[in-house]
Amino acid sequence: PGDLLERAAASRKSEANAKEIELQIEVEEDLPEVDLDADRMTQVLVNLLDNALRYTPKGGWINLSAYEVEERVELNVHDSGPGIPAEDLEHLFERFYRGDKSRQREEGGSGLGLAIAKSLVENQGGEIRVESPPGEGARFVVELPVSGE
């Protein structure tokens, strides 16, 4: 899991540096193995990281972390951006949903990224969710089963 976070961070390091955003990586020692498609999971993490970079202001931070939680491995992408309005949280993983209606299509994505991420995570036996307490940025959590379970 730590290698996945490193790959995702490395792929977006120049964008983070350009916005003076600090990319932090925290990986719990001795994490159990997870059986997954590393390329697809990297795609998920890069998508989450792209979103975090889009919304985190200059001088902010993005934390990528991996921990074992109740016999699952939890990957987190947490940013210091403005967070996600409560009314948008339940719709974020729907196809074509775009929470920020003010963004023009040229600036934003198609509204498919999080729906695809959800599908890729679920196809590997995992779950994805988002948490965004007011004023505390957004934290996307990917939970993956430990190998052999």
Image (cartoon, helix red, strand yellow):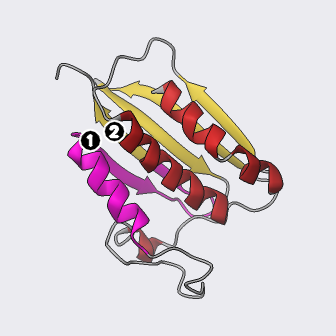
Mark 2 surroundings within 10 Å by alpha-carbon count, few (fewer than 14), some (14 through 19), many (20 or more): many
User: Going 32% across and 73% down the picture, which residue do you hit?
Assistant: 95
Residue drawn at (73%, 53%) of the image: 15
Cβ atoms under marks 2 and 1 closer than 8 Å: yes
Residue type of the residue flagged with mark 1: Gly
Residue indicated by mark 2? 143
Residue drawn at x 45%, y 55% is: 131
Q: Position of residue 127 (x, y in %)?
A: 28, 46
Residue 123 part of the magenta segment? yes
Q: Is residue 87 left or right of residue 80?
A: left
Location of the N terminus (image quadrant): top left
Q: Is residue 23 above or below residue 66?
A: below
Q: Is residue 37 left or right of residue 140?
A: left
Q: Is residue 104 above or below residue 37?
A: below
Asked whether 110 falls inside the magenta stretch, the response is no
Mark 1 highlights which residue? 126
Distance Cα–Cα, label 2 vs label 1: 5 Å
Is 38 left, or right, of 25 in this rendering? Answer: left
Residue reaching furthest to the left: 149
Which three-letter amino acid code belongs to the residue tagged 2? Glu
Above-or-below relation of 22 to 95: above
Q: Which residues are magenta?
A: 111-140
Residue placed most toward the observer, 133 or 125: 125
Q: Residue 72: x, y in percent?
A: 30, 28
